[in-house]
Image (cartoon, coloured by chain):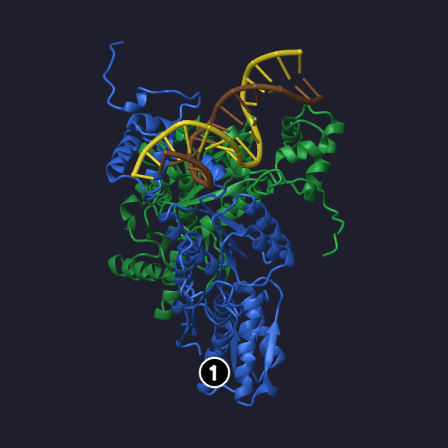
Chain colours: A blue, B green, C brown, D yellow
Amino acid sequence: MPSRKTTSAASTRRTRATGRVTLADVAAAAGVSPITVSRALRGERAVGAELVERVQAAAKALGYVPDPAARALASSRSSHVAVIIPKLSNTVFVELLDALQRNFVAAGYQMLIGVTHYDADEEEAVLRSFLAHRPAGVILTGFERSPGAAALIAGSGVPCVHVMELADDAALYSVGFSQREAGKAMTHHLLDSGRRRVAYAAAQLDPRTLQRCDGYEAAMQEVGLAGHMHKLLSPEPSSLALGGQLLEQVLRDAPETDAIFFCNDDLAQGALLAALRLGIPVPERVAIAGFNDLPGSALMVPPLTTVATPRREMGERAAQMLMALMRGNPVEQPQLDLGFQVVKRASA
Amino acid sequence: MPSRKTTSAASTRRTRATGRVTLADVAAAAGVSPITVSRALRGERAVGAELVERVQAAAKALGYVPDPAARALASSRSSHVAVIIPKLSNTVFVELLDALQRNFVAAGYQMLIGVTHYDADEEEAVLRSFLAHRPAGVILTGFERSPGAAALIAGSGVPCVHVMELADDAALYSVGFSQREAGKAMTHHLLDSGRRRVAYAAAQLDPRTLQRCDGYEAAMQEVGLAGHMHKLLSPEPSSLALGGQLLEQVLRDAPETDAIFFCNDDLAQGALLAALRLGIPVPERVAIAGFNDLPGSALMVPPLTTVATPRREMGERAAQMLMALMRGNPVEQPQLDLGFQVVKRASA
DNA sequence: CTGAAAGCGCTTACAG
DNA sequence: CTGAAAGCGCTTACAG
């Protein structure tokens, strides 16, 4: 076999048994020390511009890729960001995840996704396991968690941003909107359009669902209809099918109901579909409203009135806030209110 | 301040500056060497049962948690599993992810989720970045990828399982079902129920969508209707809204159409909703069929006829297969066909 | 079945 | 602005 001229410098050295290209290889090729390569590649200032260029060229020529494990071990900080959400079967969280993911990968971070299934023990377990990876930061859903979980986070010293809700505590970082105000706003919309017997139907009963319920109660109170509130709170997981069942139950239990505010769009869409099937005219017999403005809600028959929530923006801004924290940069607005919007369509 | 008796043994030693409990601490507490602790904790055989117990007790007392970075660096294999999917906005992939996640976390692995957005370059980039983390295994969607991406995987030596489709190549591992056969089966169902002008409408045009189209063509051919095929293939991403548009376009371009087979349920649900809005009777004027049997499809008006696909089972079995591969265990069925099921409901 | 030595590939202080 | 030394916390061969 004729010897071929190799263009790649990589073929000239081969020190390690693993065959990996290491910092030392790049250093040798660039004629500098490994620490200089490390600094140059990480963009640390205090490296001569000419050297930086030389090092980058050598790294590229050798196809050098830093080893995240070595880096994490030496610096005791990994390139991981832990993200904890309640469920993967909820579109809202998936959209949030999607936005977080785009922002983190663009900045060179990997997401570790933990799912709690709305269970405090599961959350604690997943946090414990993730924290062992020394993540650079943590994204948490809401503020309700076990004391053990809270202690784990506090003890870790890892920066943390909460999404979906807004913190009362000024020391906490959060990106979200007022679930209570949103619930109140939708209830007022129903009231303003002439409805008097507005019911609130919810499932899962997580903190946000209950905060929306608070808003509903506040609005009913404000118009002097507190005595005519009707709440149907199911602990079961949310689903289209459950929405249909809740619709039927509300109309059976409280036939005078002229509007139902569902805590989310899944339930509301299910109710709309059930109404269609059962021949219940919406909004004539009963107005239906949801929450979140999922894709599809605008296409329902009739189109669903709902509250648009900023999932993608929450993901983007939370990622940015966390990255600022991780870099030790100041965060001018630790409680970032992204607001919401009542979207009036034909169903209510 | 009065001195308090500390119950935790952890307070008695404090060698490292980091304050972490390390293998060495556990070793000292148990009166053995660090390597023995390492072996005992990993459940490597060749450690005396009595010692294992002693080590485990010491580890527990000290609250020892192994450092994944150190482990990865020393063994050049991390506790990560890389999972590459096309999109997060597709319920099918999210359900797959959910099943994978449950199985991997239960076994102590962390998932690194990569999203390609159906782009070969993005896939290659995410693979390159993930492979730098030396994952213990990789889960890939389908078989179509750039030569560069394929080379990365092959070169890494990391075990790999493909999901969604079945491999032709006996050397590849896969868990899925025949997309082509499923497309064919649904087309035959429409034909068997008396439809003659069956159209196929698709979006995104990923490999699986096109394989289903192959099945459609094969079925039409088999009944001598090849001359009456009508295909509407849109490269746009799938959505409910697009489903409605495709419905209208098919009926405009080919008014004789008496059934439309949509490549997925999103499109089909959108078509059903549009039909409702436009007053097009389904299935009387035109039968509508989908693919995947998403939650909600059974609740449509009319309920959607579709093909049920085993997303969760694919996730579970793929995770198991990959873990067997990672442990060097034999895999008796490298191409695991999980099948599909035509679900006949009222829409077709 | 148990251990002493060496090393995985980086980065953190500490110098100069 | 650049570098020599030490170490991060584990595991891999190699012995015995």
Residue with the most extreme bottom position: A224
In front here: B88 or B336? B88
Give the answer, above or below, for where B75 lies relative to A248.
above
Give the answer, above or below, for where D13 lies relative to B266.
above
| Circle 1 residue | A188
Residue B166 lies, in percent from the top left, at 44, 35
Local crowd size for mark 1, using a 10 Å CA cut-off: few (<14), some (14–19), many (≥20): many
Residue B149 lies, in percent from the top left, at 35, 34
Q: Is residue A180 left or right of residue B156?
A: right
Q: Residue type at mark 1?
A: His
Give the answer, above or below, for where A15 lies relative to B65.
above
In front here: B108 or D11? D11
In front here: B91 or C12? C12
User: Which residue appears at 63% of the width and 30% of the height?
Assistant: B38
Res B348 visible = no
* Quadrant the N terminus of chain B occupies: bottom right
Give the answer, above or below, for where A261 lies relative to B251.
below
Q: Quadrant of residue B181?
A: top left
Residue with the most extreme top position: A1
Residue A48 lies, in percent from the top left, at 27, 39
Q: Quadrant of residue A199?
A: bottom right
User: Which residue appears at 61% of the width and 81% of the height?
Assistant: A254
Chain letter of the residue carrying label 1: A
In front here: C5 or A263? C5
* Quadrant the C terminus of chain B occupies: bottom left
Res B208 visible = yes
